[in-house]
Image (spheres, grey):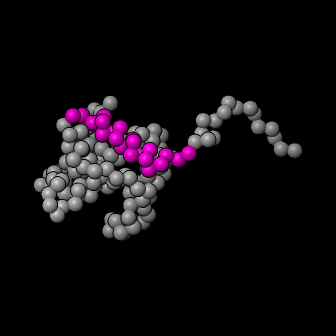
Amino acid sequence: MGQKLPDFPANRWADAMAPTLDDFATMARDALRELPAPFADLARQVSVRIDDFADPAIVAEMDMETPFELLGLFIGEGIAQGGSTGESGQLDNAIWLYRRPILDYWAEHEETLGAVVRHVFIHEMGHHIGLSDDDMDRIEAESP
């Protein structure tokens, strides 16, 4: 006969569902609200989009082996390159967050999902405003 499993309290994950695209949008909005004032103002000029994966053409263009390698992406012309939103004929600057790669990363690391989404959002926002990786790390550390 098989071994009897010990009795455990109800597992909070037993009925949990994977976060939806809308859940990710909420986490991105939370990350935006937590940015220090000057950066939050700049971030509001960029649309945030959520999808399960990057478009296959982007994955190929970036010479990636799998779409799981790309957690987020800034698309547009950043402030450092003279870009702005709202000019006729110019697409809006956008930060893309990719749900499935972020979930995969989260499953393999000891961070909360909200922290991972926040990190990816801040990193991509940094590309929009022309910050270095060190600058982005500092801003993220200063956010509540």
Asked whether, in this view, residue 131 is left or right of residue 62, the answer is: left
Q: Main secondary structure of the magenta part?
A: helix
Q: Magenta stretch: residue 23 in it?
A: yes
Q: Position of residue 57 (x, y in %)?
A: 35, 69
Quadrant in the picture for residue 53: bottom left
Using the image, determine if residue 93 lies above or below residue 28.
below
Q: Magenta stretch: residue 125 in it?
A: no
Using the image, determine if residue 60 lies above or below residue 99.
below
Image quadrant in which the C terminus is located:
top left
Q: Toward the viewer: 144 or 105? A: 144
Asked whether, in this view, residue 77 is left or right of residue 25, the answer is: left
Residue drawn at the location 60% of the way across and 35% of the way down = 12
Q: Give the range drawn in magenta.
A: 17-37
Taking the image as drawn, is residue 2 in sight? yes
Q: Toward the viewer: 106 or 54? A: 54
| Residue that protrudes farthest toward the left in the picture | 82
